[in-house]
Amino acid sequence: MRRAVSVVGELLVTAGVLTLLFVVWQLHWTDLTSGRAQAATVSSLEQRWERTDPTPTAAPSQQPAEQPADPPVDPVAVPGVGQPFAILHVPRFAADYAVPVVEGTGTEELKDGIGHYTRTVMPGQVGNFAVAGHRVTYGKPFHQVAELRDGDAVVVQTATQWLTYRVRSHEIVRPQQVSVIAPVPDQPGAAPTQAWLTMTACHPMHSARQRYVVHALLESVRDRADGPPDSLAPPAG
């Protein structure tokens, strides 16, 4: 009996150590490795875009650098699943916050950055450009999503444009409430007339019981060749 109890005790201790190591790996090591990989992807995208930067079609005095989001911007080509195609900047999170956006929201895609829901529109198009990201593990790009405030800028950088969205609302929903990524958020079946961005992440922290959702509306569009928009500046307060 004593021997059996001793063996069981050793097994429990071993299981506890293995569980602790798994937690450390899940919470910290994946952040480190995915964070480095995502930063490398951002650098690669920017270098590729710099080699193919379009030249402005008119001098700044003839054409304003930033234009209202009406009419909608030209469509962006739909990438293949897993392919990075944009960079998300959120000044509220950090002045240097820049995370790649990849096509798809599967497990593998979310390791590589922020995932784009494949059945939603591309950046700047009328409808809902909806994305998902981890709040913990794998670089945790949406760790601070609940800190966003109404009016905060969320800037999407593509090969040709800077698109500035402004936060308009927050909500917490059940995972099954997919209406949050409808073309008109929370209005399934409604015909869209505006360009939205929706950010989704698990809620509460360390749980997948609910989803934290932020909706933002496209405010302005700027040609990438004209340089970054003023909206990239960190918010006051």
Image (cartoon, rainbow, N blue to C red):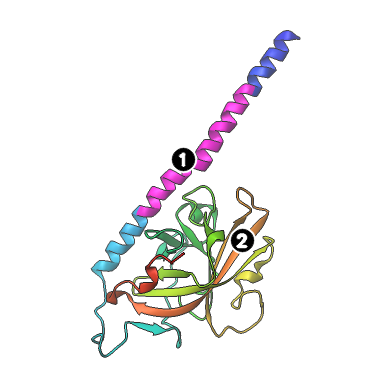
Q: Is residue 206 above or below residue 20?
A: below
Q: Which residue is mark 1?
A: 29
Which mark's residue is nearer the viewer, 2 or 1? 2
Which residue occupies the extreme front position in the image?
237
Q: Please tell me which residue lies in front, 15 or 69.
A: 69
Which secondary structure type mostly characterizes the magenta part of the structure?
Answer: helix
Residue 208 as seen in the image, left or right of residue 224: right
Distance, label 2 to label 1, CA atoms, is 25 Å
What is the three-letter code of the residue carrying label 2? Tyr
Q: In the displayed structure, does residue 125 sit left or right of residue 52?
A: right
Q: Residue at x 45, y 56 (%)?
A: 113
Location of residue 190 with respect to 137 vertically, above or below: below
Residue at image mark 2: 212
Q: Which residues are magenta?
A: 13-39
Q: Quadrant of residue 58?
A: bottom left
**Closer-to-camera residue (161/204):** 204
